[in-house]
Amino acid sequence: MLAEILLAEKKPLDAMKEMWRSDSLPDGPSSDCSFCIEADLGRAFDQANMPDSAIVHWEKYVGAQYLGRVGQDGSYLAGIRKRLGEMYEAKGDVQRAATNYRAFLALWKNADAELQPQVREVQRRLARLKDTGGK
């Protein structure tokens, strides 16, 4: 909880320290979910304007194989995919940007009406990428 407060206070580096502390016990990890911290670390690195580190942690999250991830995915996956698309687009990596935008759109294809502006924004971004050579 302290890490979330620190993120809200725009102190991402301090938040990361709390995330690591809360995920660790003296004899190892605090749970069997080795990837659970990755979504939060990605958020903190993103807020700290460290996009390469955010990408690394979010890619670990997206690629993790864990049966119990459904609850966490409901909170994080669509936002991570959208933000990864934006980050890859900013880096000029059209293919990875398009892949993440398409994943976001698949997750939110039936989003509520108040969320549709975000869906349309990503559709526009994806169309722009296609115009520049992205598939």
Image (cartoon, grey):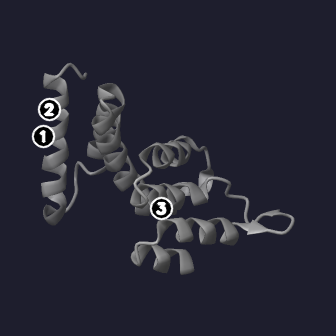
Picture layout, residue 38 above or below residue 64: below
Disc 2: which residue: 127
Please tell me which residue is depicted at 14% across the width and 31% down the height of the picture: 128
- Whether residue 38 is visible here, answered yes or no, is yes
Q: What element carries label 2?
A: helix
Q: Where is residue 59 in the image (x, y as percent from the top left)?
A: 50, 42
If you read the primary sequence from the N terminus, does the residue marked by circle 2 or circle 3 appear first?
3
Quadrant the C terminus occupies: top left
Q: Which mark is residue 44?
A: 3
Structural distance between the alpha carbons of marks 1 and 3:
27 Å
- Judging by the rendered image, the residue that carries numbered circle 1 is 124
Tell which tag, 1 or 3, sits nearer the viewer: 3
Image height check: is 46 above or below 98? below
State the residue in front, 133 or 109. 133
| Residue at image coords 34%, 49% | 83
| Res 1 visible | no
First in sequence, mark 1 or 3: give its number.
Answer: 3
| Local secondary structure at mark 3 | helix
Asked whether disc 1 touches disc 3, contact meaning CB atoms under 8 Å apart, the reply is no
